[in-house]
């Protein structure tokens, strides 16, 4: 049962990641004019992405790790069952 739940969590985390990657743009570019040199006319622009977008991928990562833990836990229980019976 734990192995089935673990496989479900792994598949669900991959599908969640793919949906988020498809429908949401993870790298929104924020333009900021940093400085303009008045002698040459060169303008420096810095690009970056907001930090809150990276947190969207934390939940699927945690679910993926929980799925791996359930599979690992179920395989260890099978070893102990074979040893004692």
Image: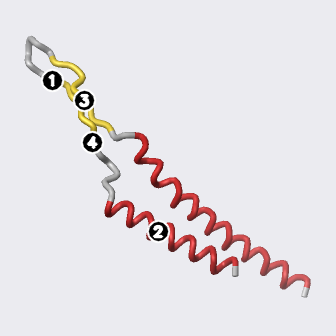
Out of 78 and 9, give the one closest to the viewer: 9
- Residue 37: give x, y in percent of width and height: 14, 15
- Residue 54: give x, y in percent of width and height: 43, 47
Going from N to C along the chain, the mark reached first, 2 or 4, is: 2
Going from N to C along the chain, the mark reached first, 3 or 2, is: 2
Answer left or right for 41 relative to 2: left
For label 1, the crowd category at 10 Å Cα-Cα, with few meaning under 14, some 14 to 19 and many 20 or more, is few
Out of 9 and 74, give the one closest to the viewer: 9
Q: Is residue 14 above or below residue 25?
A: below
Q: Classify mark 2: helix, strand or loop.
A: helix
Separation of marks 1 and 2 at Cα, in angstroms: 42 Å
Pointer 3 with pointer 4, Cβ within 8 A: no
Going from N to C along the chain, the mark reached first, 1 or 3, is: 3
Q: Residue beneath label 2, please?
A: 14
Q: Is residue 29 above or below residue 9?
A: above
For label 2, the crowd category at 10 Å Cα-Cα, with few meaning under 14, some 14 to 19 and many 20 or more, is some
Q: Residue beneath label 3, please?
A: 32
Answer left or right for 1 relative to 59: right
In the rendered image, which quarter contains the C terminus? bottom right
Going from N to C along the chain, the mark reached first, 1 or 2, is: 2
Q: Residue beneath label 4, please?
A: 29
Q: Residue beneath label 1, please?
A: 43
Separation of marks 2 and 4 at Cα, in angstroms: 25 Å
- Residue 84: give x, y in percent of width and height: 91, 83
Going from N to C along the chain, the mark reached first, 4 or 1, is: 4
Which image quadrant for residue 63?
A: bottom right
Q: Residue at 66% x, 73% y: name it.
A: 71
For label 3, the crowd category at 10 Å Cα-Cα, with few meaning under 14, some 14 to 19 and many 20 or more, is few
- Residue 43: give x, y in percent of width and height: 15, 23
């Amino acid at each position: 049962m734990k192995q089935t739940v673990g496989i479900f969590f792994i598949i669900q985390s991959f599908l969640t990641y793919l949906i988020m990657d498809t429908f949401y743009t993870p790298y929104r570019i924020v333009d900021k004019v940093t400085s303009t040199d008045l002698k040459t006319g060169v303008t420096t622009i810095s690009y970056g992405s907001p930090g809150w977008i990276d947190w969207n991928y934390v939940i699927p990562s945690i679910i993926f790790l929980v799925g791996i833990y359930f599979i690992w836990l179920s395989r260890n229980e099978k070893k102990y069952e074979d040893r004692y019976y």
